[in-house]
Image (cartoon, helix red, strand yellow):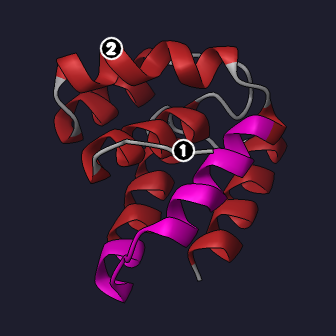
Amino acid sequence: MILNWTKKEFEAYVLLFAAHANHIEDKKENEFINTLVNKETLHKIHTEVVVDSEKENLHKIQEYLSNNNFTNVEKENLLRNIKKVLFADGSVDVLEKKVYTILQKMLS
């Protein structure tokens, strides 16, 4: 699988995946993501995240990470933003915790 994403598109994919962890598209989570990623990129990536299964989501994330160099600082920033997305609505449920743990391991 060849993913021709920019790093911003990858970031959008990961953040949207995290936001959809509990299968609820929360307005506050989307508003936070909009502060990090422009609307054009967000719109482009949104459908892909929603259409892909969780298994496909994780495979694409792992594939992109394997084929692109990320510094520790970039990984830490992405994890911090994932956490902010998950807390944007004021609570983190079990599904969101599960997804965060998985993404944390992938980015470590």
User: To which quarter of the image does residue 36 belong?
Assistant: top left
Is 33 in the magenta? no
Describe the element under mark 2 as helix, strand or loop. Answer: helix
- Could you say where residue 50 lies in the image, as x and y percent from the top left? 62, 17
Question: What residue do we see at 70% from left, 35% from top?
Answer: 21
Callout 2, which amino acid? Answer: His
- Could you say where residue 69 lies in the image, as x and y percent from the top left? 38, 77
- Quadrant where the image shows the N terminus: top right
Closer-to-camera residue (31/18): 18
Residue, disc 2: 43
Between marks 2 and 1, how big is the CA–CA gap? 20 Å
* Mark 1 neighbour density, 10 Å: few (under 14) some (14–19) many (20 or more): many
- Quadrant where the image shows the C terminus: bottom right
Describe the element under mark 1 as helix, strand or loop. Answer: helix
- Could you say where residue 63 lies in the image, as x and y percent from the top left? 62, 58
Residue, disc 1: 86
- Could you say where residue 47 lies in the image, as x and y percent from the top left? 51, 12
First to last magenta residue range:
56-76
* Relative to 65, residue 23 above or below: above
